[in-house]
Image (spheres, coloured by chain):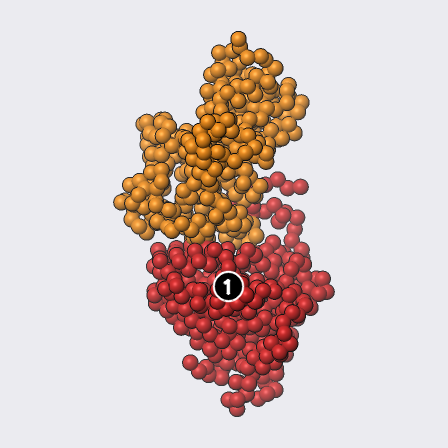
Chain colours: A red, B orange
Amino acid sequence: MVLDLEQLLDLYRDMWLVRAFEFGLEREFKKGTVPGMLHIGVGQEATQAALAAHLEPTDCFFPDHRCHGLNALAQEKHAGSGQRIMAELFGRATGVCGGKGGSLHSADPAVGNFGDNAVEGSFMATVLGVALAWKMRRQARVACCVIGDGTVGRGEFHESLNLAATWQLPVLYACVNNGYAISTAVGASHASANIVDLARGYGLPCVQVDGNEIELAYAAVAQAVGHIRAGRGPYFLEFKTWRWQGIFSGEFRPPEEVKYWKEEHDPLKLARQKILATGRAAEAAVDQIEADTKAQIERWIQFALASPMPGAEKATANVYVGWEVASR
Amino acid sequence: MTAPTAPARTRTFVQALTEALEVTMAEDENVYLLGEDIGKMGGDFGVTRGLFEKYGAERVRDTPLSEAAIIGTAVGSAMVGMRPVAEIMFADFLGECYDQLVNNAAKLHYMFDGQFKAPIVVRTACGGGFGGGPHHSQSVEGWFLNVPGLVIVGPATPADAKGLLVASIEDDNPVLFLEHKALYRVKGSVPEGKYTVPLRQAAVARPGRDLTIVAYLKMTHEALAAAEVLAKEGIEAEVIDLRTLRPWDTDTVLGSVRRTGRAVVASEAPRMGGLGADVSATIAEECWADLKAPVGRVGALDTPIPFSLVLEKLILPGKDQIVQAARQVLGVRPAA
């Protein structure tokens, strides 16, 4: 598949939104305005833009902990603005979960976002149920879960693939293999550094793609989603990519590896080169995309900072459906 | 609560549970069952017997030995409107899906601020007394008591088993539904058709004025047997069957203790960190002025459950321990 210039520009813009979101968030986190913990998805923008381009609000996705950008894109595409994702990360009342979920538990079913779960792999079991319900109701929808390479070590990975294949469920496994689970290299802790090798035994289509080449990532998601919507069962996609964030804030990887991924194989640089190589886009216009998304993110941050904190009544709200619990 | 409208017949505990599944499946196509060997085989204890033939493999769904996937599937489907009833063959296996119940089912309504519900029921066989050994005999409610958002139900009679299971399926919260294996063959009067027994409401299994015995699951029967022994000594014990273990019915329990001034709490689980600890602590906090004696607490010894029936009998509590605790609370010596 070769994308036309307009599609490329749209995806480039979405990728920049993801990067600007994460850098803006990281800056605020370091200032202390964003509580808790933060895992950013810089370097993985192409996978998120490719997924966001194909998932409908009637589908679902379970985002992982580096998917703020995907969450924001879904919000923007289907609810008009990603600012409520930003506000959620600041723990504000205007956030998608009223500030009760934060970075690791942002959900908005109206845009298909079924929420992250901070126990990696847990939602690999949950996604089966959504897919099963849709299959039982004959609804041609895609139930997607975004997992990391580290998640593969969990038993749920195997329980999930086995059942999705056995029951032929409409599940899209989007595995973002960024090379490391915190500090441990994929190949050092798994039988293969290629996750597709571990998935293939379950008999579902398993495809590995360069997750930093937006055209390849986009085409791979299109293929997978088409397969699932046609009722042909689950599909496993592995995006080979790399995260810029080291262990929290410290770098631990060899300098040549860092240089390759940040300078030679950066998804945004690659996309920019591709756009300029068409000869039909002015460099200034491409630069403007970057500036516009950064300005957009600053507006969302301002929205979050200006938003109220949750009211005290929220502390005990929604523990049970229909039953109150004692408040202080 | 929907009261029964049809006459009652004699049914076993297992048959009562099957009827509960049957009446809810007939009424609501979103109700479906999943678990290990629940299809043609009808489940390890026969609770789903006959339902596969009636509702087919789609709604009576056999699974592999994947407890996390079973509960995850239940939760995910409930998030989009299904009403799954999952069977975990033995409660001891809940460790395999602990995360799904504790971090997922119990929390998603709260952490996503009400945007999702997880109306699942997890039925499971618990309890000892039959030589099942360390991994087929445990009373697991203590593992889950500290989990806000979860409901734990434990019926003692066939009629309650049916009414509470229907209520659990219809409830919008995740319910861990405990079935004591020793009760499966117990017979009792069970109304025909559909009815519910309300959650969070204890039952007075036997009225009395001298002391309150709080029990649940099989211990309700042990408490009733103990009350018979005590009655012969002129002591009238009130037996309260909790029925819902989390959140438990403080009104009924505290109301009774305020009248009797004495309480014994009986559980089959080890005493440390168990439901008996929570009930007795709450009684001590709330009924201090009415209490004439410290609360008595009956539970298993602080050990795993051994295979040998001789040893198991030493570990697990029963009628005799309840009688003994009651006498102690009352300050009376055993009848000669």
**Residue A307, horizontal then vertical, whole percent:** 66, 60
**Disc 1 packing (10 Å; few <14; some 14–19; many ≥20):** some
In the image, residue B70 above or below residue A281: above
Residue A83 appears in the figure: no
For badge 1, the amino acid type reads His
**Residue B44, horizontal then vertical, whole percent:** 36, 40
Q: Going by the picture, which residue comes out furthest to the bottom?
A: A279
Q: Residue at x 59, y 85 (%)?
A: A285
Viewer-proximal residue among B71 and B121: B71
Q: Which residue is mark 1?
A: A190
Q: Residue at x 52, y 35 (%)?
A: B304
Q: Residue at x 59, y 24 (%)?
A: B296
- Secondary structure, mark 1, is loop
> With A72 as the anchor, is A172 left or right in this view?
left
- Chain letter, disc 1 residue: A
Q: Going by the picture, which residue comes out furthest to the left?
A: B53
**Residue A183, horizontal then vertical, whole percent:** 61, 65
